[in-house]
Image: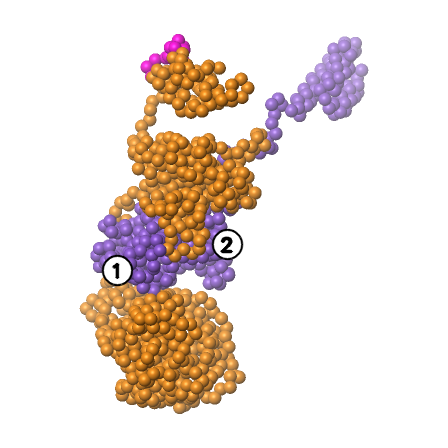
Chain colours: A orange, B purple
């Protein structure tokens, strides 16, 4: 809301510089967005209320203050409204609009139908009040003072009549409209719902299709205005207009908002009506507009004002308790301040046993409860003057959400393993998402910003791959990124941990050859997460997701369920993600919530260290290259005595000395007893049994 | 043979010692002066025997001193020559070390964890909530019924093609973390003292200052004696811990439908120290969070007695804090995941 300082000063005698006024109002909740110099034509009126002839040549320097008005304060979308705040802040009286001698014709006229127009209010639910007056006019440009004020406020001057309606809107916040009476069929206005299939060409030249729940102002035939939003072109005021009907109404905020939204049409009027306008203002608006039209010599009103107001608003005083003010603000406010603030803002107050009985002015549509009054008091008393205290801690705080500690642990493990943390958007491109979930499982966004953000991510991997591509395109030799966050499918949100690893396996060092990341780097990372979450995970080649390469990927499972997958990304998706086709890209994703379902909170108990030494034996066998190491380990375990505590591969070799299609596998077996020191003889015997089991089961040959 | 001979021998030795550059030079020098057969000092010692008896003790002493002195100097020189030789198994210690791999936390995680830590110290429970919400929890229960103009402040992303604004129940991406106020109060009796960090979504285009997804930390305190003064004290302390203890904090009226009174908190501009600069629009202040006393309608929506209980709530944007703390000029950097950016932040 742009406010011209000289205009503001017509309402309140603030002598403070504009910067200070701006700051003070900011501290009252009206944020000063900007402060700009302006040049305007001074306004001067003669004793009889008419403007002096001005040729626009005399000018003066002025200042425009631009305030941001919050949605709850439509009353402050006017010079008068902000002047009232300034008057209260400075403890100064608020003047009524400077209107010379006031309306020359309207005053003291009985409220009856104005000459020449018939007004029928058919939808009082959408229009609680409708006022109108008929004015004979001479269309001309506005005087320079009026035009320059509009311009300073950001409104384009059109002609004297339209300018006056806009001037009243800016000055007191009451939106107005002028119809050309000659263009109204039957010289009548009907405030009714639109008919099915009805259309209107609005002032901006667009044809609008109306819906039956939209309110229109129609003449005897068709809609002439979309109520509270925009007038129609047919009854627009033009150079040849001789008589206008001035409309000054109060429309239902929800109705205006819905209509404005559905027509995609936002105007100065609609933005005020949808927040709620002063039901007391329609007549004031008419009076003000007529006074101005007469002041600038643009016209003269005919007798009478129409005022359709079937159910006048009954004032409902609010009880304001002195004790409650202190309970909310944390400190008592002196009675004198309370009374000064509330009456300054236009409230009517009467003492009551516990405090006051307060009636709100009709323009304060935001005030409906006691606490709203307390806010007004706090706002003008100033929050600065309230003490700073701590809430009493009167109960033991509950435990934090267990997901927080779990996610933090997973992040810590991945960070310690050399992966950096990424954060990517929860919405992704639909085409990319299709690679990671069935179409039926993907949740689309109804009103996406763009195709790039059109579905919720069924997996963290698309976002991580995009981040990896971003870094690879910037000559980054090794990219290791992870993310912990929600993935979403039709079955709901679940917390995932995912990572992507491309390029060098290590950081690269002068002492050794570089090596690309491989399956075992990625698998080891997943094992480490399982370990951190105290949930052993197993790997299998079954039910692999389609985005992974068979033979270099595994499904990850806990004891009872599938919890994720790990492996090499299929080349088609590598390219789709914007990475070079020849890149080996390793990814993994784990469902942390699924792992949690498996976790058994265990009381950690330390195991005593072994009292007897262990004996280690290495074994090297040549077996078929397709035989999984896990099977070999299984055979060893079942053939070995209970004293075998571990069997771990330390070499796998193919090449010279090993026949084609075969592989040499070396394992270190460790034996130990909890009761005694083992003898070489019994370990030798165990090794013999193991070897013979391997020979029988796998045709293994010892090397 | 006399004193002068001894002095000359010493001078000559020292001149030659200074020219020694290898162990073999040193050996020749030793031979020349101390060699058992032809050493000059050895010869000197021998000549003492033929000196007049009254001079013998003096000359003997001088010659002996010279011998000991030379030997000490030869040993010193030997040590110094050895110390310049490369030791066995030496490495070039100026080559780079083999640093173990380590990743970097995302700056937004750093800020989030810092905020969680501050409030945990103040006795708050840290909770999380769903990112997919319904209209009731995101808007209606927070005093924003359908067609409330305040809904414009938060342009919403709806799911499943649901048309916004038709009053039908809709699923949506939460526009703020405030729905967790409702979810928590629906299932817990006062007193309440929680914070809820999490992602939120708005239908905003990506630009220097906006991202369609960002993160907030919500706070809620409810009890029988909670006041606006408690809000001020708590948030001032929080901002002092998050920024600097000397940071100035300002509270100003604002509007949120779910709080009354509503309060915005500002900190002294971190870029110009409150003197006024383009970032703070020459005001010297930067908006940092929204807060207020819980609106009685919100209490009524969850079945709390709005006469008996009062409370305050606040929401702080994690990106906003990170932008100010780290002087980041483009919010998009947080979601681009450029390692050159991420690696600037501490481990």
Residue for badge 2: B329
Task: Using the numbered discs, state the Cα–Cα distance from disc 2 to disc 1 in whole angstroms.
Answer: 39 Å
A338 is within the stretch colored magenta:
no
At 61% from the left edge and 25% from the top edge, which residue is drawn?
B90
Q: Is mark 2 on a helix, strand or loop?
A: loop
Kindly identify which chain the residue marked by label 2 belongs to: B
Q: What element carries label 1?
A: helix
| Residue A176 percent location from the top left of the image | 36, 78
| Residue B316 percent location from the top left of the image | 38, 54
At 51% from the left edge and 18% from the top edge, which residue is drawn?
A659
Residue sticking out furthest to the front: A197
At 71% from the left edge and 20% from the top edge, which residue is drawn?
B23
Residue A135, compared with residue B332, is above or below; it is below
Residue for badge 1: B297
| Residue A541 percent location from the top left of the image | 40, 31
Q: Which of B189 and A634 is in front in this view?
A: A634
Q: Indicate which disc, 2 or 1, sits on the residue closer to the N terminus.
A: 1
Q: In this view, does A514 lie to the left or right of B134?
A: right
Q: How busy is the neighbourhood of tag 1: few (under 14 within 10 Å), some, or many (20 plus)?
A: some
The reply to the same-chain question for discs 2 and 1 is: yes
Q: Residue A28 carries which label?
A: none
| Residue A404 percent location from the top left of the image | 35, 42
Q: Give the range drawn in magenta.
A: A673-687
Q: Is residue B259 left or right of residue A352?
A: right
Q: Which of A197 and A413 is in front in this view?
A: A197
Residue B295, compared with residue A277, is above or below; it is above
């Amino acid at each position: 809301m742009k406010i011209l300082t000289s205009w503001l000063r017509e309402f309140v005698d603030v002598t403070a510089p504009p910067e200070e006024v701006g700051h003070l109002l900011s501290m009252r909740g009206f944020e000063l967005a900007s402060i700009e110099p302006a040049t305007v034509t001074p306004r001067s009126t003669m004793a009889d209320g008419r403007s002096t002839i001005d040729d626009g040549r005399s000018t003066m320097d002025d200042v425009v203050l631009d305030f941001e008005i919050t949605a709850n304060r439509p009353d402050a979308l006017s010079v008068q409204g902000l002047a009232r705040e300034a008057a209260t802040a400075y403890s100064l009286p608020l003047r009524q609009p400077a209107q010379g001698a006031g309306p020359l014709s309207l005053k003291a006229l009985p409220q009856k139908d104005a000459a020449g127009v018939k007004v029928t209010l058919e939808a009082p639910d959408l229009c609680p009040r409708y006022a109108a007056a008929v004015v004979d006019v001479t269309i001309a440009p506005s005087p320079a003072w009026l035009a320059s004020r509009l311009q300073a406020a950001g409104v384009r001057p059109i002609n004297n009549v339209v300018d006056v309606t806009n001037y009243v809107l800016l000055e007191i916040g009451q939106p107005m409209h002028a119809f050309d009476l000659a263009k109204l069929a039957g010289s009548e206005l009907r405030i009714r719902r639109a008919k099915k299939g009805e259309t209107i060409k609005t002032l901006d030249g667009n044809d609008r299709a109306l819906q039956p729940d939209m309110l229109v102002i129609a003449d005897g035939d068709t809609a002439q205005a979309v109520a509270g939003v925009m007038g129609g072109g047919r009854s627009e005021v033009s150079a040849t207009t001789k008589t206008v009907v001035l409309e000054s109404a109060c429309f239902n905020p929800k109705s205006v908002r819905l209509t404005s939204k559905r027509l995609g049409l936002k105007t100065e009027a609609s933005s005020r009506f949808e927040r709620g306008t002063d039901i007391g203002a329609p007549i004031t608006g008419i009076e003000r507009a007529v006074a101005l039209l007469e002041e600038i010599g643009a016209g003269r009103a005919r007798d009478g004002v129409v005022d359709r107001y079937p159910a006048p608003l009954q004032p409902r005083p609010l009880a304001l308790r002195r004790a409650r003010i202190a309970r909310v603000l944390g400190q008592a406010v002196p009675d004198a301040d309370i009374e000064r603030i509330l009456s300054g803002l236009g409230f009517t107050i009467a003492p009551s046993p516990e405090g006051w009985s307060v009636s709100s002015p009709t323009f304060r549509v935001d005030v409906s409860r006691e606490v709203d009054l307390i806010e007004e008091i706090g706002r003008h008393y100033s929050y600065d003057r309230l003490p700073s205290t701590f809430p009493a801690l009167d109960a033991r705080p509950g435990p934090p959400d267990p997901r927080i500690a779990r996610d933090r642990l997973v992040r810590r493990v991945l960070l310690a393993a050399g992966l950096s943390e990424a954060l990517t958007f929860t919405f992704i491109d639909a085409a990319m998402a299709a690679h990671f979930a069935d179409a039926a499982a993907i949740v689309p966004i109804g009103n996406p910003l763009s195709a790039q953000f059109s579905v919720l991510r069924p997996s963290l991997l698309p976002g991580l791959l995009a981040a990896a591509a971003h870094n690879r395109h910037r000559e980054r030799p090794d990219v290791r990124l992870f993310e912990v966050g929600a993935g979403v499918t039709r079955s709901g949100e679940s917390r995932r941990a995912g990572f992507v690893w491309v390029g060098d396996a290590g950081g690269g060092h002068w002492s050794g050859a570089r090596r690309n990341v491989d399956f075992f780097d990625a698998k080891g990372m997943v094992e480490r997460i399982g370990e951190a979450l105290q949930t052993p995970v197993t790997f299998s080649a079954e039910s692999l997701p389609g985005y992974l390469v068979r033979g270099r990927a595994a499904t990850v499972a806990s004891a009872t369920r599938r919890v994720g997958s790990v492996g090499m990304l299929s080349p088609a998706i590598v390219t789709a993600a914007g990475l070079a086709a020849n890149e080996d890209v390793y990814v993994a994703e784990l469902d942390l919530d699924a792992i949690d379902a498996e976790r058994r909170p265990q009381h950690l108990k330390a195991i005593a260290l072994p009292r007897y030494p262990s004996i280690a034996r290495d074994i090297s066998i040549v077996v078929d290259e397709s035989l999984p190491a896990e099977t070999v380990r299984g055979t060893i375990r079942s053939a070995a005595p209970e004293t075998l505590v571990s069997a771990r591969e330390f070499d796998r070799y193919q090449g010279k000395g090993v026949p084609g299609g075969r592989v040499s596998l070396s394992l270190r077996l460790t034996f130990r007893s909890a009761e005694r020191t083992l003898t070489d003889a019994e370990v030798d015997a165990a090794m013999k049994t193991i070897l013979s089991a391997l020979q029988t089961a796998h045709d293994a040959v010892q090397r | 043979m006399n004193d002068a001979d001894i002095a000359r021998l010493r001078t000559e030795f020292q001149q030659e010692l200074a020219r020694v550059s290898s162990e073999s030079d040193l050996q020749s020098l030793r031979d020349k002066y101390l060699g058992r057969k032809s050493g000059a000092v050895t010869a000197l010692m021998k000549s003492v025997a033929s000196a007049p008896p009254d001079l013998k003790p003096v000359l003997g002493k001088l010659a002996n001193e010279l011998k000991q002195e030379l030997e000490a100097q030869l040993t010193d020189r030997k040590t110094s020559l050895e110390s310049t030789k490369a030791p066995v198994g030496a490495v070039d210690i100026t080559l780079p070390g083999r640093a173990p791999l380590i990743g970097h936390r995302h700056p937004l995680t750093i800020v989030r964890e810092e905020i969680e830590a501050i409030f945990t110290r103040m006795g708050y429970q840290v909770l999380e909530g769903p990112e997919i919400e319904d209209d009731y929890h995101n808007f209606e229960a927070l005093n924003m019924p359908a067609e409330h103009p305040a809904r414009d402040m938060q342009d919403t992303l709806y799911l499943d093609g649901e048309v916004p604004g038709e009053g039908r129940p809709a699923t949506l991406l939460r526009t703020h973390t405030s729905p967790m106020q409702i979810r928590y109060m629906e299932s817990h009796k006062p007193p309440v003292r929680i914070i809820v960090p999490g992602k939120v979504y708005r239908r905003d285009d990506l630009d220097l200052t906006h991202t369609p997804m960002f993160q907030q930390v919500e706070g809620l305190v409810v009890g029988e004696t909670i006041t606006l003064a408690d809000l001020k004290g708590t948030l001032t302390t929080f901002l002092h811990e998050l920024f600097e203890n000397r940071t100035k904090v300002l509270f100003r009226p604002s509007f949120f439908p779910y709080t009354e009174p509503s309060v915005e908190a500002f900190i002294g501009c971190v870029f110009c120290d409150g003197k006024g600069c383009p970032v703070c629009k020459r005001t010297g202040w930067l908006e940092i969070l929204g807060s207020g006393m819980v609106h009685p309608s919100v209490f009524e929506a969850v079945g709390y007695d709005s006469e008996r209980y009062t409370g305050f709530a606040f929401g702080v944007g994690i990106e906003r804090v990170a932008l100010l703390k780290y002087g980041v000029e483009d919010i998009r950097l947080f979601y681009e995941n450029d390692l050159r950016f991420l690696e600037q932040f501490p481990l």
